Image (cartoon, coloured by chain):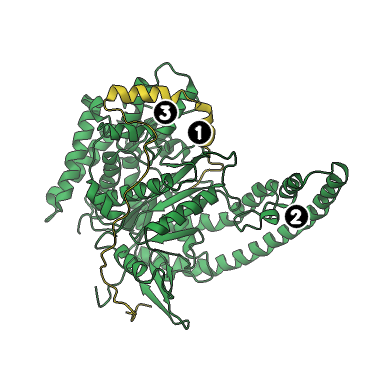
Amino acid sequence: MTSAIATTRPVTEDIPQPLPASSAPSALPQPATLAEVLQAIRQDCLVQPQVYLEEVRVPFGGE
Amino acid sequence: MKIFDRLIGLETEYAIRFRPHFSTNRPTDHQLYSFLVGALKRKLPTASPGLPGQGKEGVFLANGGAVWFERCRFAGQTGLVEGSTPECRSPRQLLICQRAQDRLLSETAHTAGIGDFCLLKNCRDSQGQSYGAQENYEATLATGWRLLLWRAGWILLYPLNVIQFIVFIVLLVALLAILFLANSLLGGLVYALVRLIARPSEAECRRWQERIFGRFWVTRDDADAPWPPWLEEPLFVVLQLGLTPFFFVVSLLVGLTDLRRTQQRLTAFLASRAVLGGSGWLDAEGHFHLTEKAETRRTVWLETIPDFSRPVFSNAHFCKMVSSFWPRWKELLASRQRMQISLGDSNLCEEAEYLRVATTLLVLDAIEAGAIGTAPTLRRPLRAFRQISRDPTLTTAVAVRGGRRMTALEIQRWYLDACRRFVDNAANPPGETHEVLRRWADVLDRLETDRSSLVGRLDWVTKQFLLDEAGADLPYTARKKIDLRYHELSPGGYFSRLEAAGQTTTVATTDEVAQAMRLPPSSSPALRRARYIREFSGSNTVLRVGWRFLEVIKQGGKKTTIDLHEPLLWD
């Protein structure tokens, strides 16, 4: 059933406050060139890859 | 018929990765989800769901979307974070909302301050388990006599479903009672012997109790299972088998509708769409595939065993509409319904995500307008999905009816040409259609002639580039880490690093995404849902929110139900 309802406050398009900007510290300095990015990825992927694979496990999956 | 006028939405399951900073104890996935939602509530007004048939733990947000805990199986603390975008109408609007959701969740996880907590936007874990993305498109289910057939079918099916459900519940409760009794007697005996002989510490006692009786009896946490871990699998199988007859009949019923004809015309397009929207995947033998999802589909449309069939076109949402004591008849018997597609990957590249949805939307519009009467029909669709996905050279041709063979690019060009004709003949098509056609043609051209120019634009091309350039000659585990960490939504994620270095292209602007983190899209039911959430969040009025309906319960218990799809006086 559909009906308009009386509310204590008018349901209007309010103006929400902006979200606080992320204060997330960068885990790594961001390389500026593609070659530097590739080099950083090559180094990082060799750091305990098995540990990383263990961390990304989803028993049974989803959907 | 209007183009880009239907409701569309995306559901994305994010895998959780966590590494504690100090302690060695890892919080459970459910605890991490709770941290995430707690932090979200400090950023945005929220409201609880609670309408029949939703069943999942989650929260609706003031931007019109929602966040859920997708529990693995039906017990335990393991699971995924699932985000649902608000309903949108144009592909660009949907892309903006999806990007806003990704950013909101990833920033919130990253700043939760409880360790290295981040989300991965992908569809396969390190062991190959499947989860990920689902697309929802409003579509015509049936008209005329087919709609009458659909409605009559449900009216006949519902009493049978109720009887089957009651019988099943009685049998399940009886089975549970027997198992609990047997487990209490035998387990109790084992536990008493362990305490008597081994004299374990208090902590060891708790572990034994969890193992023998179930974790719930130790933690008293509702998220924990009240049965021992070994019982999880048999119970799940019993539940699956109990629901199988119902799912089977629903699949047959959907087969009688116009929706099935639409799905048949879409199938070849979806198989070949892997060249646009595939995210790339490294299998256990180290072979590169275009998509994560192609290997996981077991059927195209026949969904018989819940959580096992893994169809391309899911019918589970129809089943959920009648799974409570109060069936959602108004939705179930409507001519327009949600068509759910489970074949697409989650994307990191904006253009890939945009094209995945926009091209599907355009093809769907063309099919429903009668502009695609006969489409290429795959002789063996499941085999074709795999053949296309396993060939990054894009030269494999799959068998289509009529004795022909077509490559994925040829199939895509067939649909592109059909959509061009459809748009050319349409009266006042939206400007965005031309933008979609231009990008679609450009990407197909580049896939044939200049693939390297698509790094940063298509995920599978970008991931293959990273594996070739950064992962060459490295052991499998390191290459697999590239495959997975590409999807990590954090500054350390490999796609994020490319993005920060300006090596990716964008479709949505930063301002558009920032706005969609707070506000719902216009001309959508999400607009009204969001208004109510902002109005009543934190007040004494109870709000129960759903995708179609919303209940406002004022002090004194007076309840008002709002249909979010119907216009109100003040709209």
**Of the numbered discs in the image, which one, if any, rests on residue A57?**
none
Please state the horizontal and vertical placement of residue B324, each as a whole percent of the image. 53, 67
Q: Nearer the viewer, mark 3 or mark 2?
A: 3
- The correct choice, above or below, for B118 with respect to B545 in the image is above
Q: Residue at x 44, y 42 (%)?
A: B118
User: For residue B168, which quarter of the picture?
Assistant: bottom right
Quarter holding the N terminus of chain B? Answer: bottom left
Q: Is residue B393 visible?
A: no
State the image coordinates of residue B100 (x, y, percent, origin top left). Answer: 32, 50
Question: Do circles 3 and 1 both sit on a common chain?
Answer: yes
Q: Which chain is yellow?
A: A
Residue under label 1, please give it.
B126
Residue contact between numbered discs 3 and 1, judged by CB atoms under 8 Å: no
Relative to residue A37, is residue B270 depicted above or below? below
As measured in the structure, the alpha-carbon distance from the residue carrying label 2 to the one carrying label 1 is 34 Å
Question: Residue B351 lies in what quarter of the image?
Answer: top left
CB within 8 Å, label 3 to label 2: no
Which chain did the renderer colour green? B
Q: Earlier in the sequence, mark 3 or mark 1?
A: 1
State left or right for residue A9 relative to residue B446: right
Check disc 3 and give the amino acid type.
Answer: Ile
Mark nearer the viewer, 3 or 1: 3
Mark identifier at residue B179? 2
Query: What element does badge 3 sit on?
Result: helix
Q: Which residue is mark 3?
A: B482
Q: Label 3 to label 2, Cα distance in Å?
A: 45 Å
Element type where label 2 sits in the image:
helix
Chain under disc 2: B
* Viewer-side residue, B525 vs A42: A42
Q: Camera-side residue: B495 or B385?
A: B495
- Residue at 54% in and 46% down: B308
* Location of residue B182 in the rendering, given as x and y in whole percent from the top left corner: 80, 54
